[in-house]
Amino acid sequence: MIRAKILLQTLWKEGTDWDECAKPNSVHVWCRFVENLSEVGKIEVPRWIGFSPTYNIQTHGFCDASQEAYCACLYIRCQQDINPATTRLLVAKGKVAPLQTISLPRLELCGAVLLSKLLNQVRSQLDLQKASVYLWCDSSIVLAWLEKPPYVWKTYVANRISEILKNVGNSTWRHVRSNDNPADLGTRGCKPQELVSHSLWWHGPEWLCTPPNSWPSSQPQKTQPPDQRTIKAFHMIEKKDVIDGFSSFARVLRIIGYVFRFFHKCKKISQDAGPLTQHEINNTKTRLIILAQKRYFEDEYS
């Protein structure tokens, strides 16, 4: 089905109208699809998945993505006492990639979101609330995104991590090899004649029927995840001009002039007393103008 969805998206991209002939490449893809369509009748899906309320039930979800599509599939693992466990495909869903070009790690994240929605819907419809949940992904970047809270990442990643946590909570996420990931089949499609006996799709990886201690435990190679949000903090110091504290310029000249006189007296440069002279007022005015110009150029070109 994912091949048919990709073909429809391709026709839309090409701008082909409903009464127009498709381009030769799209026609070739369609003819191959029609030739294989008759083989769908050979596919048989059992109605019973081996479930019983007394069995030890586990739910395993897998997700994957490619540049064309992303997929999520859900398996039920049932085991009675010491008997060997059995696994069956319960439900799967695939979607074509968005028209807007986005990176593969983000598409992998969309696959994880699809898996969380699928699991949330199944658990609401079936009595699987007590079943253990294991979610598998072959993208080390997505697993690194899921290890940290959403606010650490940029908006695109943060929103989807929040949605995953809302749907599945703190469920266990593990790394799986791409060769053991059945969702990989849902991202690139498969011919019906190949799907009939495709054990990985119908039953999941072989090790899923073995005891949990034999499941893959190796951690993926640590990869620095992209889209990490950089938080910058700024501290602004407001500089107050001494002139702003006075009601008139004449008052500023008088007070600053006395300050300069006091400064000169401390240095024993002048022993003047009484009211300010015109020379002292002019000198103070010149200094204030120079100070104001210096402050202006510092603010303008800093």
Image (cartoon, rainbow, N blue to C red):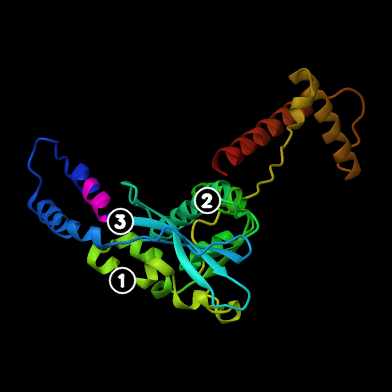
**In-image side of 233 versus 205 (left or right):** right
Image height of 105 relative to 299, above or below: below
Q: Is residue 66 visible?
A: no
**In-image side of 129 versus 224 (left or right):** right
Q: Residue at x 39, y 71 (%)?
A: 200
Give the magenta part as a residue range: 3-8
- Depth check: 20 or 190 in front? 190
Is the stretch drawn in magenta largely helix, strand or loop?
A: helix
Asked which secondary structure carries label 3, the reply is loop
Report which residue position mark 3 lands on: 68
Quadrant in which residue 256 is drawn: top right
Q: Amino acid at mark 2?
A: Val
Quadrant in which residue 244 is drawn: top right
Report which residue position mark 1 lands on: 197
Q: What x and y, as percent, mark residue 177?
A: 44, 74
Q: Amino acid at mark 3?
A: Glu
Q: Please report whichever mark, 1 or 3, sits nearer to the chain's N-terminal start.
A: 3
* Label placed on residue 122: 2
**In-image side of 253 versus 36 (left or right):** right
Image height of 302 relative to 205, above or below: above
Q: What separation in Å lies between label 2 and label 1 (alpha carbons)? A: 26 Å
- Depth check: 157 or 270 in front? 157
Instruction: Confirm or deny contact between disc 2 and disc 1 (CB under 8 A).
Output: no
Q: What separation in Å lies between label 1 and label 3 (alpha carbons)? A: 25 Å
Asked which secondary structure carries label 2, the reply is helix
Is 4 in the magenta? yes
How would you rate the neighbour count of disc 3 (Cα within 10 Å): few for under 14, some for 14-19, many for 20 or more? Answer: some
* Label placed on residue 32: none
Q: Amino acid at mark 1?
A: Ser
Q: What x and y, as percent, mark residue 208?
A: 50, 74
- Mark 2 or 1: the one toward you: 1
How would you rate the neighbour count of disc 1 (Cα within 10 Å): few for under 14, some for 14-19, many for 20 or more? Answer: few
